[in-house]
Image: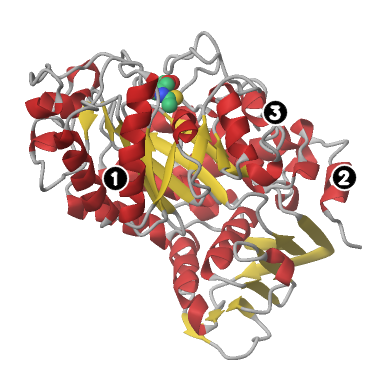
Amino acid sequence: LVLVFGAIAAWNTAPTPASAAEPLQSLVPVPVSVQPAAGVTHTITADTRIHTSPAAHGVGDQLAALLRPSTGYALPVADTTGVPADGITLLIGGAPASVGDQGYQLTVTSAAVRLRANTPAGLFAGVQTLRQLLPAEVESRTARPGPWTVPGATITDHPRFAHRGAMLDVARHFHPVATVKRYIDQLALYKVNYLHLHLTDDQGWRIVIDSWPRLTAHGGSTQVGGGPGGYYTKAQYQEIVAYAAARHITVVPEVDLPGHTNAALASYAELNCNGVAPALRTDIAVGYSSLCVSKDVTYTFVEDVIREIAALTPGPYFHIGGDEANATTDQEYRTFMDRVLPLVGKYGKKPLGWHEFVKTTTDTGAVAQYWGTTTSNAVVRNAAARGQKVLMSPANKAYLDMKYHSGTPLGLSWAGFIEVQGAYDWNPGTHVDGVPESAVLGVEAPLWTETVVTPAHVDFMAFPRLPAIAELAWSPWSTHDWDAFRLRLAAQAPRWTALGIDFYRSPQIPWT
Ligand code: TNX
């Protein structure tokens, strides 16, 4: 009996909290296909070995590192050329073609666990599924009693969208490397594969640019509310990029241009049309600042910044911001983008930006990030008609900085309150008129940080909405079912607790 995704939806029509406790029915994001092997389980023991094909060795080491602290087992990882009869085997190759370059097939029998994919990224995604099939205590960093039992099944899975993103605003409040790494770990568990870092804004510039050192020395010295701010050295930034890459997450750097630039304008008087540097700002107003579009030094500055950051960026995108440029006229905005977008290409990157910018270019490699609150938008509709791709981040659905309800202690509410069901119940492939699924590159959940200061704040705003958005980005729409999702989400909570994630206990979810 093969339960394809349609059958899973049917299977979940009469869910009970007891059935949701079954790990095969508790996966987030829900897989494409789950075929349970009734009555079969596999138990990881002190004797379990991890066998890997050579290209899978790195993911095997990551699986072992994940399992060793809680199990207390040695879990040696060794290369194999065959398919051993026992233990956990990770193989590159031999997965069905349907899983593509990001999917995997996981087979659990009483004798063995076998995970196959066509790429290390696919294997890594499969490891996240295996992780969720183990008891939540597997997330503990100290030894737990187990038993470490996995339900028998064959799971065949691949993502709906290639681009599954999250954004962290490190400009409004600076978030140190450790906080970003913690977020990366959380993203990996839900198969998110892009981390967009909003590195610059009116209140702070957060990455060293060697040719313009005052950007961080002065422009990085404060933040919203007037705290000390901070910034990443290039070495620290590279540490983040490498940490993400090891988890198959690509960092997208954003330098917000030409607005949202007060920190740069305050650092260098010559970037201002009047030649006068404004004071640093620690309030949360938007739309008042702009680089001087008519000065050549502006483009020297922008090219230096793009060149230096592109050199630290293995990924394909450079995010140029482009939002809320209310201090420039439409013509100035176009003049600016006409000069800046080619610079992104000059340094080997594709331009990504908040959707406004895409009105200035017909480049089909340019990606528009939709952040509007309506389902009809001429800029993105026209972009899709021209063959450009859209990244979906509708503010009234996907913004993790919106309050859950009027009493939420953190967050803003300009795009509305977003409870868990609101974050989950929309379809990225049909959300905006004239932007069909084929024009949608993926989905991103942005976390702006005007009110988000600590790692606990990040946890509270991201959980449980981040997993909801991650499921929209990964799982086929045919699996979409709020009644089933809320039970699967509830079953994730013990895992968050084991990970030390202090989540919002939404009354919409039957937490156990
Ligand atoms: C709008 S969304 C902004 C940000 C704010 C955010 C707060 C967008 C492209 N710009 O500058 O931080 O709202 O929710």
Q: For the residue labelled by badge 2, is the local secondary structure a helix, a strand or a loop?
A: helix
Left of 153 or right of it: where is 187? left
Q: For the residue labelled by badge 1, is the local secondary structure a helix, a strand or a loop?
A: helix
- Name the spot of residue 337 as percent of width and height, x first: 35, 35
Relative to 356, is 477 above or below? below
- Name the spot of residue 136 as percent of width and height, x first: 57, 49
Ligand 1 under 8 Å from disc 2 Cβ: no
> How far is disc 3 from disc 2 in space, using C-alphas?
32 Å
- For ligand 1, the image quadrant comes to top left
Write the residue at 21% across / 25% down. Answer: 292
Q: Amino acid at mark 3?
A: Asp
Write the residue at 70% across / 51% down. Answer: 23
Write the residue at 26% across / 47% down. Answer: 306
Mark 3 crowd level (few <14, some 14–19, many ≥20, 10 Å Cα): some
Residue at mark 2:
11
Numbered circle sitting on residue 337: none
Relative to 439, is 433 above or below? above
Looking at the rendered image, the disc whose residue lies closer to the viewer, 3 or 2, is: 3
Q: Nearer the viewer, residue 412 or 488?
A: 412
Q: Nearer the viewer, residue 465 or 242?
A: 242
Q: Nearer the viewer, residue 113 or 320?
A: 320
Left of 450 or right of it: where is 76? right
Can the viewer see residue 458 in this picture? yes
- Name the spot of residue 440 as percent of width and height, x first: 62, 42
Q: Quadrant of the N terminus?
A: bottom right
Image quadrant where residue 256 sits: top left
Residue at mark 1:
178
Residue at mark 3:
433
Q: Amino acid at mark 1?
A: Ala
> How far is disc 1 from disc 3 in space, using C-alphas?
40 Å
Q: Amino acid at mark 2?
A: Trp
The earlier-in-sequence mark between 3 and 2 is 2
